[in-house]
Structures are given as C-alpha cells and as structure tokens.
Amino acid sequence: METGSNNSLPTQFPVSHKSFSLNIKGNKTDIVICKYDDSFMVMATQIGCMGTILHARKEESVSTDPTFHVAVIFGKRDEPFLVACARQLIEHTSSYGSTRPLVLSLGLKDHSPVINLPSVF
Amino acid sequence: MASEELEENLSELQIGENGEKKPVENDVSDGAVKVSCFTEDLQDVTLHFQIVNFSKQIYAWIGCNSAKLGHLYAAATTRPNNNVSVTSLLGGTSDNTGSSIARRIVLKTGLNVVVACNIPKDSPMLEATAERKLVERLASLGYFRPKEKHSN
C-alpha cells in the first residue's frame, strides 16, 4: 500500500531522480532512485539512514551469459540476502540493456528474506 | 504490489528524463526524505549539488561539469572522543577529493554523512568553493548544530 508519492521532475538538472514512500509489511519505506551518467543509485530505508551500501556491476565476458559482481562496501557484510537483493536488481536493470553499475543502500528493519526483500523489489 | 510499482517507477525514470525542461533548482519532499537539487555556475565550471536528507543521515552528491557519481565517502563520529572518521567506499584511493568535505560536514552537523564527489583532483580551490556552497545550503536547511569548540 502506498503511503505517499511524488512525481519525478524532469529538469535541467543533470541527475534524474525519483523519491516515493511505500508501506511494506507495516513499515514505511522511503525509496530514492537517482540516475547518474555512469551509475544508478537506489536508496531504500525504513530506519532513517542509508543502512548497508552495496555496489553491483555487470562484467562483460566473451561468453553470451553476463556475470555480475556484487559487494558490500559499507555496513552489514553477514546478510547474504542483501547481496541477493542487489544481485537481483542489477540483473533486472541489465535485462533492460543497461550496463551501468548500481549503488544500492538498504536500511531495513527486518532482514528476513521471506518477509521483506521480495516485497521491496 | 510493491515490486510492480518499483518496476513501473524505474521505467518512468527512463522515460521521464527525456521530458521537458524545468527550472534547475527544485526541492522534492515527501515528508520523510527530502531531495534538494541545485546548480551553481562559476566562471569556468558548473557545480551540481544533490542533497538527500534522511532523518539520521545526509547523502550529498557534488558534480563538476558532469553527472557522474564520482568517488563515494562515508564519514561519522566514532569512539572514543567522538572524533570524525572518514572512509572511502568507492574510488578515491589516491586523491581523496571530497573526503575532507565529508569530514567537515560531520563536524558541523553531527550527523553521519555519505558524500559522492567527482571534482577532479588537484583542485583545492574548486573543492573549497563546492564545500562552501554545500554548507550554505545545509545551513539553510537547518542542519547545523550550535557552534562547539572542535580540536582538529
């Protein structure tokens, strides 16, 4: 259920961004998506700060199947489902033809994969 | 469903950036997270600023003539004595342009800060100007705590 939303504002500002709020399993989740020239930044938080920051990039290889490199660059490094979330998102953007790396920040109250991560993305 | 909404928003973002031009400076607020964007035109460079205000943290991006993300730094007060520590998250291993900005924002605001900056290295004057503009904006947003004596 959506608790609040706003409209994206295509402007002369070089970075496009969109921010909105969602209610996920009773937790208000603020999401900000920014598009830079060379990367995407996605921030999803339920705790008022950025939380764990992950970096995901697509690695081109000679084979037809792309590979992806995902790493935690700040925060919890013992939550594998955060890495899985970033992996899922970079694969999603890659499926649309984008080769830009992704910086994902997740500040979630509950890291349970069954409850939270499928709902977020 | 939340995932469908996010996919829709991502596709809208792709389409939306090709839209009509609007005034450069805009503030978008949804009540909890505020995104502020503004541009400063200097003599020979154009500085772009983006500030995302979370309740307990600040994210700031500084662009110099481009919209690349640049180097990413995190800064916060750490134990003991609440001294400010800065770490490089992405890039910035040799020139550290932006790390001093992150550190001084923490000193002034007391909040955790994540700064992304693509100012070229060996540009101390440009870095100082960018920091001054960013600090002015943060002050107008009410993020500065009362002045305290800091030992550097």
Image (tube, coloured by chain):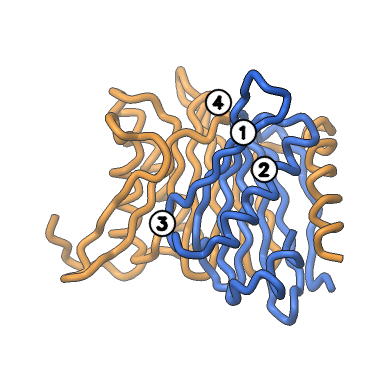
> Do badges 4 and 1 share one subunit?
no
Residue B122 percent across, percent down from the top left: 28, 23
Of the residues shown, which amino acid type is indicated by label 3?
Answer: Val
Q: Chain of mark 1?
A: A
Quick one: label 2, few (<14), some, or many (20+) residues within 10 Å?
many
Quick one: label 4, few (<14), some, or many (20+) residues within 10 Å?
some
SS category of the residue bearing label 2: helix
Vertical placement of residue A15 versus B1, above or below? above
Q: Chain of mark 2?
A: A
In the image, which disc is placed on residue A96? none
Do labels 2 and 1 touch, CB within 8 Å?
yes
Judged by depth in the image, the label closer to the viewer, 3 or 2, is 2
Which residue has dot 1 on it?
A58
> What is the drawing colour of chain A?
blue
Residue A21 percent across, percent down from the top left: 73, 66
Which residue has dot 4 on it?
B66
Q: Chain of mark 4?
A: B
Q: CA distance from mark 2 to mark 1?
A: 7 Å
